[in-house]
Amino acid sequence: MTRLTADFYLRDDVLTVARELLGKVLVTQFDGQRTAGIITEVEAYRAPEDRACHAYGNRRTPRTEVMFRPGGCAYIYLCYGLHHLFNVVTGPEGMAHAVLIRAIEPLEGHALMCQRRKYAAWESLSNRQKMALTTGPGALAQALGIHARQSGQSLTDPASPMWIEEQGLRIADKDIACGPRIGVDYAGECAAWEWRFWIKQSPFVR
DNA sequence: CAAACGATCGGCT
DNA sequence: GCCGATCGTTTGC
């Protein structure tokens, strides 16, 4: 396995990093139990000018503080009181950029992912249920055992239990679609920016 | 200190 | 398609 290193995340163009994350593999390994999936859908958030970004205007709060760290750590927060949303912090220190991971295609640890999501055994699921298991940011975080208290966790430290790795899957530009981000209607003109990217032919996208 | 509000999901119609 | 669940974070009084 080749864990992505700090130089991947430290680049200052979060839109490029977001597109390049498609096809990479998000992994968690807690208590020796490995679960992983291919990233199929992402969204970019970019302070200070992006009103949809929690750190809009470079506003620092206890929650958003980790977004200002050097790229390569997780920003995880609770949404709607029940969903833990996983983001990757990117850019150099002081630049609050992040990529929200919105969907993955299950690759390893199907049984544990089903268990965490309170689904029946993977083999017994309908195609629709298989898709729902890890499609949507709250769903994939639950499947991977991700929790907001892990916010700030390094993705590059060799000892860290969560990381992103390269497994040789390359997504060509022509296979990437883009559109406005989901659920950011409050963000004025920023709501129209096409900063959501997904793998065109993947069924693991909404 | 109180209250409003989400970068959502799943179940039901 | 619509609606209710549910709680940490933020902001304003």
Image (cartoon, coloured by chain):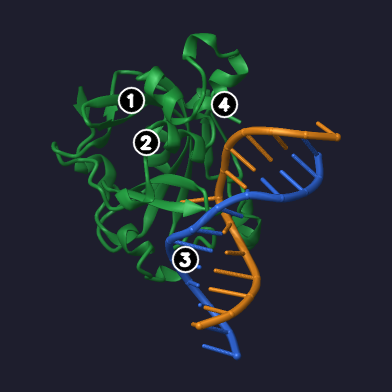
Chain colours: A green, B orange, C blue
Q: Residue at x 37, y 70 (%)?
A: A60
> In terms of secondary structure, where does tag 2 sit?
loop
A140 to A180, vertically: above or below: above
Q: Earlier in the sequence, mark 3 or mark 2?
A: 3
The quadrant of the picture occupied by the N terminus of chain A is top left
Q: Earlier in the sequence, mark 4 or mark 3?
A: 3
- What numbered label is drawn on residue A56? 3
Q: In which quadrant of the rendered view does residue C1 lie?
A: top right
Q: Residue at x 47, y 66 (%)?
A: A56
Q: Nearer the viewer, mark 3 or mark 1?
A: 1
Q: Earlier in the sequence, mark 4 or mark 2?
A: 4
- What numbered label is drawn on residue A115? none
Q: Residue furthest left?
A: A158
> In terms of secondary structure, where does tag 1 sit?
strand
Q: Earlier in the sequence, mark 1 or mark 2?
A: 1
Q: Is residue A160 visible?
A: yes
Q: In which quadrant of the rendered view does residue A170 lie?
A: top left
Circle 2: residue type? Gly
> In terms of secondary structure, where does tag 4 sit?
helix
Circle 1: residue type? Thr
Which residue is labeled 4 in the image? A132
Which residue is labeled 2 in the image? A145
* A32 lies left or right of A40: left
Q: Chain of mark 4?
A: A
